[in-house]
Amino acid sequence: MIRYTSAPDVCRALRVIVGGLEEFGYVRLERVGCVASWGSRSLSLARIHGVSRAWLVGLGVEPGYVIEVIGERFYRLPPRERVAVLIHELLHIPRSFSGGLRPHGRLVNERRVRRLLRELESRGLLEAAIREAGWS
């Protein structure tokens, strides 16, 4: 059975990433939740979940996202790679912040992740994100 826990460390790292990269200026962190799952059989390191249109209309809920890290896999990574995984998940959020997700391809790919990771590092914010999350 999968167990979910809040992941405040992930949220703290996201604050530094989003605040430090203009690329993510449209991301409304107050509408992004962070959880860690334990016991998943998924081969993924992390996933992002959007709120579907049905929920938005049916419940009057604002668009939002949940970033889920697969605890057994994510926390085994070196801190730098954890930040890269979070950048990848953030790239799935469209500029419209509509609750939908961008697919892998031109806007969500390893090349963009590495470029943004280097940008974060050149600004001295990679270490700040790692420190803020408590991963150092």
Image (cartoon, rainbow, N blue to C red):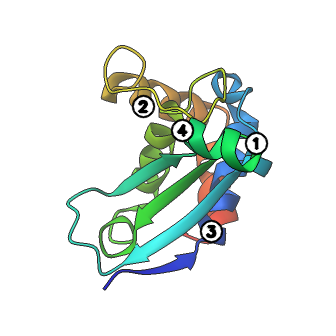
Q: Nearer the viewer, mark 4 or mark 1?
A: 1
Kindly indicate the quadrant of the structure image that contains residue 98: top right
Residue at the image point whose x is 37% and y is 65% from the top: 74
Q: Report how far apart the C-alphas of labels 1 and 3 lie in the structure.
A: 24 Å
Q: How many marks overall?
A: 4
Tell me where residue 8 appears, x and y as whole percent. Answer: 66, 70
Q: Nearer the viewer, mark 4 or mark 3?
A: 4
Residue at the image point whose x is 76% and y is 39% from the top: 28
Q: Earlier in the sequence, mark 2 or mark 3?
A: 3
Circle 2: element type = helix
- Pick out the residue farthest to the top: 106
Circle 4: element type = helix
Q: Circles 4 and 3: CB distance less than 8 Å?
A: no
Q: Name the side, left or right, on which 71 lies relative to 44.
A: right
Q: Circles 2 and 4: CB distance less than 8 Å?
A: no
Q: Circles 2 and 3: CB distance less than 8 Å?
A: no
- Reading the image, the residue beneath label 4 is 90
Q: Report how far apart the C-alphas of labels 2 and 4 lie in the structure.
A: 10 Å
Q: Is residue 66 above or below residue 97?
A: below
Q: Report how far apart the C-alphas of labels 4 and 3 lie in the structure.
A: 16 Å
In the image, 74 versus 65, the foreground residue is 65
Mark on residue 9?
3
Q: Residues within 10 Å of mark 3 (few under 14, many from 20)?
A: some
Q: Earlier in the sequence, mark 2 or mark 4?
A: 4
- Reading the image, the residue beneath label 2 is 113
